[in-house]
Image (cartoon, rainbow, N blue to C red):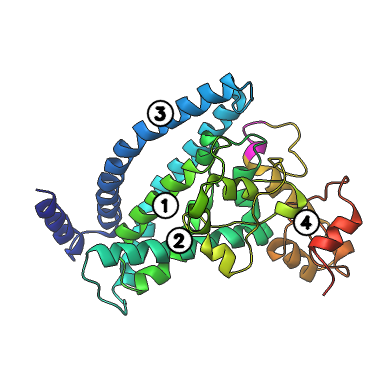
Amino acid sequence: MQISSDIALDAWLRCSIIPAFDLNLAYSIKFMFKESALILVAAPIYSVAIAIELIVSNLRAKKVYSFKGVLENIYLSVINMGLDIIIRGAALLTLEIVYDWRVINWTEGAVYWFALLIAEDFIYYWLHRIDHLCRLFWAVHVTHHSSEEFNLTVGFRSSVFQPLYRFIYFMPLALLGFRGIDIFLMYSITQLYGILVHTQLVKKLGFLEYILVTPSHHRVHHASNLQYLDRNFGTVFIFWDKLFGTFTPEMEEVKYGLTKPIKDVNHISLVTHEWKRLAADVRGSSSWKVKFRHIIGRPGWTEAKSTEHPLHHDLRGALDPSISESKIEKRFPHK
């Protein structure tokens, strides 16, 4: 029944007489069916995991959750999901158009899905890394890092506007012969795994630390400690970080959040605080070149510091005054 329904829907999608709006809607519906099945499987797992984390942390008298923090995480997740649903049809249609120019024809099976897993995780490593190293995209991604808590619900604390451009990164995958619907499904699967590594309860996992992104690796990624900044970008596999020089193991205790916490947090500033700072820096720039540098340069770059080493400022926007110059030079030596 599932096979026949997929064939029927594919026939509808390929029908040249249907309007583009219907095509967008159809791709969205087909993906939503598959995604709904995935959510039905994942929801009980998350519910049990969150309940265990909440109970165990309370028994250990360790404050891991707060009501305000959970509400913020849900709020950001809902906005992200709403935006994702709005543009999903157009994104899938774009990938399907690129797919028509594919250079590889796969036979769907275990090899196809494993190759897609590796390729999608590789692409998302670079998306995630650029989100940290370009201020325009950091303004999007910062919402995921602004929590000073670290628990499973932080995994749902989404980069609100990322759906607007994420599919662009996936276009090479479509060119390599992966269907748009399958790319989005694999993205959902990898993100479901990624949520599970947002926990303080699970310590190091032996040999898995060499292959997978583990809670230990991802705690480092969410840290505001200087030596941990902008490290461990992987979602499923940690070997991308080791291959491209962005891996750091968890050593000292992690301090979560931003080095410069958000002041006067409300439902608007939670999403827009970095955009406001970026706009202020652009308005105050002395030239168009400097304006452009503020937009595409590293977070924390300022015109005043442009003659010093490029990472002199905290990559998340403001150097912690408690960090000494010697520590900065140790982590970011002059070229």
Give SS at disc 2. helix
- Disc 1 marks which residue? 190
| Residue 310 figure quarter | bottom right
Q: Marks 4 and 1: which is nearer the front?
A: 1
Give SS at disc 3. helix
Residue 304 position within the rendered picture, expressed as x and y whole percent measured from the top left = 89, 62
Q: Marks 3 and 2: which is nearer the front?
A: 3
Q: In the picture provided, is 34 more to the left or to the right than 313?
A: left
Q: Residue at x 56, y 45 (%)?
A: 204
Q: Nearer the viewer, residue 308 or 248?
A: 248
- Disc 4 marks which residue? 300
| Residues drawn in magenta | 266-270
CB under 8 Å between discs 2 and 1? yes
The alpha-carbon separation of the residues under discs 4 and 1 comes to: 30 Å
The alpha-carbon separation of the residues under discs 3 and 1 comes to: 19 Å
- Disc 3 marks which residue? 48
Q: Residue at x 83, y 47 (%)?
A: 320
In this rendering, is residue 314 above or below 61?
below
Q: How many other residues sit within 10 Å of disc 3, few (<14), some (14-19) or many (≥20)? A: few
Q: How many other residues sit within 10 Å of disc 4, few (<14), some (14-19) or many (≥20)? A: many
Q: How many other residues sit within 10 Å of disc 1, few (<14), some (14-19) or many (≥20)? A: some
Q: Amino acid at mark 2?
A: Asp
In this rendering, is residue 19 above or below 322?
below
Give SS at disc 4. loop
Residue 316 position within the rendered picture, expressed as x and y whole percent measured from the top left = 73, 52
- Disc 2 marks which residue? 121
Magenta-colored segment: predominant secondary structure: loop
Residue 134 position within the rendered picture, expressed as x and y whole percent measured from the top left = 66, 62
Q: Nearer the viewer, residue 29 or 4?
A: 4
